[in-house]
């Protein structure tokens, strides 16, 4: 595992005999120390370091280190290639922004790996933490010299860099390219990017813009560039095939430079044509030359849109009309500071705060703004629509985000979350009537399994989000859950639904059948909760009954969830560690995936005593991979399991296991995430764990309790009230709750209703290093 160097500075020490000189030395040391703190506050990242031993009294922004999660996990973890890193990117982004301007140095999800030192471009779009390649549209790459060979057929224009000359902070990225001595600095607004390229003195300073450079390749039709005048380039890219699912999107850009081109040209395939101003096709791009013998810094502003070049220009004009790079940088810093500052921490170490605020930062990337400044967006029907009264969003990792990310967004950003939900309603109405499963741009990628948007709606509603059409959402949920022919885009929301409706489970004729059944039962429970909240008693009863379908796969002889054939037989040759019938896991892990019906599950497993034995055995290892009897916390199906001790009347064991995961598998290193972040889902688990609560039951207004990591946390709720979480005696080795009070009154349940805190409250946990078994009662 990569270990981050200490963030230290050498301070001068003057040894003098005379008191006057000693006084001067003291003042000088004081001035330098103050300067270091001011530097850390105003320049949040130090070049090339994963900082350790940070001061404990800085702003939240100062603690974020975007390089955490950009490296690989230890090779001895048996997680498999798809789970071997966080897959996050370090570049400049805006909270939920349309643009993520970041370096690409690896042909891997996220586009960046810390151990790679050859950058091939800085592309405008990225997805954080996914397990497969996506986006990376329109890489810009500066170089010096004649463009003799096509960038489409060679990597000759890639450049080495050193982490010693790399800075990554929220909304800002800077790096020095060594061979050609070029400095790159990038910042963003919500829908635009702003770049500075500082070249050496040369008449052949060049910039490549690769329209055909998307991570998953580009289609011939709809991909191309056009050079306009002597300071503009526009173009588009048609790409998709996200995770090989065949989905498609088209994105446009408009770039304006503050320095005129001295000359220009294009490439197409292996052909390079000087003086050409247009190139179309899957391997098209443009190159520009600048005379930097005088003014060495070339600035470019780039707007993007999923509707048109005209809208990309309009986004640029409205969000960044001037040429003040520092002003834009400060604006995005202010946006991040406001979001991160919603959770204020008092006490704890600088290292703990770095892990926490970096995790919180990662939860605020996705979903992304999709509508332009005029409200227009490309719908699921490939027609232009206008979002009226709300912002349209894209990029929903449904299978991943439903477990904890949506709960965090609903708690911190209820207005934005409502817009996200209304966006999904629009997607359903334009895309066939049902909800997308894993939404990318204006298409349903059909990724993973389950009908997870059901939970996203129900959990958000339960946590107070109301600014969306809940009745329309429920209609889309019911359609996807009841009609095997229902569509969202090109995909059915529930494969194997005919089996599920007829047999009460998805049979082995569908891949991953046991996992799919468990997900559908969870989704049905969520539908029941929203139906009840909206006053639909019959629907509530129907779907609550369907939520018990997991029981059809519970094998009482073995005590595990076991796949069943269409004829009703349990699958032969079953072992709890086989992946047959499961998605990214095995029965030993998936048998716990009934978070809304745990008491019934535990009874079928033999009662709480046996359940506690099994859970203890399960957590002997915390991240053992997809085919083991132990926990696999690096993947989403395991997220709820550490909190299940709360339901077996042993909350102190939740406190212990959650703390072990926090401290052993989230860290300051570039491998500091235990698996793919999946749009911030992994990071959201950590944020909740550090706060000491977790949205365990889908669609239910409340939280299972653990214990807080910090002495004091204040969550500034959007309604103007504050939630105070006090951890008296908090320390990494003190996870155990000795007693708990809410607003000064003793509280003994391991379940916290949302109504208790939604208008503000003070939770005081008294913590210690030894467990108090009866401090909290089970749920």
Image (tube, rainbow, N blue to C red):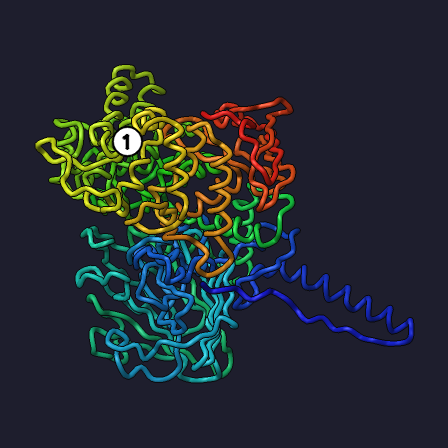
Q: Quadrant of the C terminus?
A: top left
| Residue 692 % position (x, y) | 52, 37
Name the residue located 25 percent from the left edge and 75 percent from the top edge.
267
Q: Is residue 606 left or right of residue 198?
A: left
Foreground residue, 526 or 42?
526
Q: Is residue 309 above or below residue 230?
A: above
Within 10 Å of disc 1 (Cα), the crowding (few <14, some 14-19, many 20+) is: many
Q: Quadrant of the N terminus?
A: bottom left
Foreground residue, 598 or 675?
598
Name the residue located 62 percent from the left edge and 51 percent from the top edge.
349
Foreground residue, 352 or 433?
352
Name the residue located 86 percent from the left edge and 76 percent from the top edge.
16
Q: Is residue 632 left or right of residue 451?
A: right
Q: Quadrant of residue 639?
A: top left
Q: Quadrant of residue 774?
A: top right
| Residue 261 % position (x, y) | 38, 75
Residue that label 1 marks: 523
Q: Quadrant of residue 384?
A: top left
Q: Is residue 434 left or right of residue 503?
A: right
| Residue 209 % position (x, y) | 33, 69
| Residue 436 % position (x, y) | 25, 40
Q: Is residue 99 above or below residue 195?
A: above
**Residue 598 in sight here:** yes
**Residue 490 in sight here:** no
Foreground residue, 305 or 539?
539
Query: SS class of the residue under badge 1?
Result: helix
Q: How many numbered discs, if any?
A: 1
């Amino acid at each position: 595992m990569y270990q981050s160097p200490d963030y230290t500075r050498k301070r001068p020490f003057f040894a003098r005999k005379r008191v006057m000189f000693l006084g001067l030395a003291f003042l000088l040391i004081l001035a330098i120390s103050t300067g270091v703190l001011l530097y850390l506050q105003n320049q949040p990242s130090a070049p090339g370091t994963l900082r350790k031993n940070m001061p404990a009294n800085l702003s939240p922004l100062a603690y974020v280190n975007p390089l955490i999660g950009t490296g690989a996990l230890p090779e001895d973890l048996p997680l498999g290639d798809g789970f071997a890193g966080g897959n996050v990117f370090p570049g400049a982004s805006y909270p939920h922004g349309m643009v993520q301007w970041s370096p690409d140095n690896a042909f891997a999800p996220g586009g960046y790996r810390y151990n790679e030192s050859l950058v091939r471009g800085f592309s405008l779009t990225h997805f954080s933490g996914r397990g497969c390649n996506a986006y990376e549209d329109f890489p810009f790459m500066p170089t010096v010299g004649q463009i003799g060979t096509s960038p489409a057929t060679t990597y000759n224009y890639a450049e080495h860099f050193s982490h010693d000359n790399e800075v990554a902070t929220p909304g800002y990225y800077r790096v020095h390219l060594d061979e050609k001595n070029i400095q790159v600095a990038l910042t963003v607004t919500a829908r635009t990017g702003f770049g500075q390229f500082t070249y050496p003195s040369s008449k052949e300073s060049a910039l490549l813009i690769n329209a055909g450079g998307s991570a998953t390749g580009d289609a011939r039709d709809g991909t191309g560039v056009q050079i306009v005048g002597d300071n503009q380039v526009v173009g588009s890219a048609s790409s998709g095939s996200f995770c090989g699912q065949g989905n498609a999107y088209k994105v446009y850009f408009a770039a304006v430079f503050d320095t005129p081109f001295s000359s220009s040209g294009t490439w197409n395939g292996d052909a390079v044509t000087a003086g050409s101003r247009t190139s179309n096709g899957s391997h098209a791009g443009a190159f520009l030359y600048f005379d930097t013998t005088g003014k060495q810094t070339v600035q470019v502003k780039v707007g993007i849109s999923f509707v048109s070049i005209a809208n990309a220009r309009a986004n640029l004009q409205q969000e960044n009309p001037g040429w003040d790079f520092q002003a834009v940088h400060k604006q995005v810093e202010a946006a991040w500071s406001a979001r991160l500052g919603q959770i204020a921490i008092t006490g704890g170490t600088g290292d703990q705060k770095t892990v926490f605020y970096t995790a919180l930062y990662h939860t605020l990337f996705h979903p992304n703004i999709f509508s332009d400044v005029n409200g227009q967006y490309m719908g699921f029907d490939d027609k232009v629509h206008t979002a009226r009264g709300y912002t349209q969003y894209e990029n929903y990792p449904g299978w991943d985000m439903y477990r904890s990310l949506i709960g965090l967004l609903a708690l911190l950003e209820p207005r934005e979350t409502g817009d996200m939900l209304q966006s999904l309603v629009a997607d359903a109405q334009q895309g066939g009537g049902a909800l997308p499963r894993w939404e990318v741009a204006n298409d349903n990628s059909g990724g993973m399994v389950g009908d997870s948007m059901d939970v996203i709606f129900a959990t958000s509603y339960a946590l107070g989000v109301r600014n969306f059409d809940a009745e329309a959402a429920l209609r889309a949920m019911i359609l996807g859950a009841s009609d095997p022919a229902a569509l969202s885009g090109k995909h059915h929301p529930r494969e194997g639904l005919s089996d599920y409706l007829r047999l009460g489970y998805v049979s082995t004729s569908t891949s991953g059948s046991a996992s799919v059944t468990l997900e559908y039962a969870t989704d049905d429970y969520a539908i029941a909760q929203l139906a009840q909240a909206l006053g639909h008693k019959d629907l509530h009863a129907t779907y609550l009954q369907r939520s018990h379908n997991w029981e059809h796969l519970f094998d009482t002889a073995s005590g595990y969830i076991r796949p069943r054939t269409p004829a009703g037989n349990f699958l032969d040759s079953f072992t709890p560690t086989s992946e047959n019938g499961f998605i990214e896991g095995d029965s030993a892990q998936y048998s716990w995936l009934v978070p809304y019906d745990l008491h019934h599950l535990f009874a079928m497993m033999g009662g709480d005593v046996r359940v506690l034995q099994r859970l203890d055995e399960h957590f002997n290892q915390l991240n053992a991979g997809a085919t083991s009897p132990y926990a696999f916390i690096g993947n989403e199906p395991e997220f709820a399991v550490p909190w299940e001790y709360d339901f077996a009347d042993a909350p102190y064991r939740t406190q212990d296991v959650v703390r072990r995961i926090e401290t052993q598998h989230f860290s300051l290193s570039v491998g500091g995430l235990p698996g793919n972040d999946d749009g911030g889902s992994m990071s959201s688990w950590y944020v909740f764990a550090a706060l000491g609560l977790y949205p365990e039951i889908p669609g239910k207004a409340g939280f299972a309790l653990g214990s807080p990591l910090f002495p004091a946390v204040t969550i500034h709720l959007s309604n103007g009230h504050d939630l105070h979480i006090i951890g008296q005696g908090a320390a990494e080795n003190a996870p155990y709750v000795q007693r708990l009070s809410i607003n000064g009154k003793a509280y003994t349940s391991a379940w916290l209703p949302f109504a208790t805190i939604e208008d503000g409250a003070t939770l005081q946990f008294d913590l210690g290093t030894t467990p108090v078994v009866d401090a909290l009662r089970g749920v």
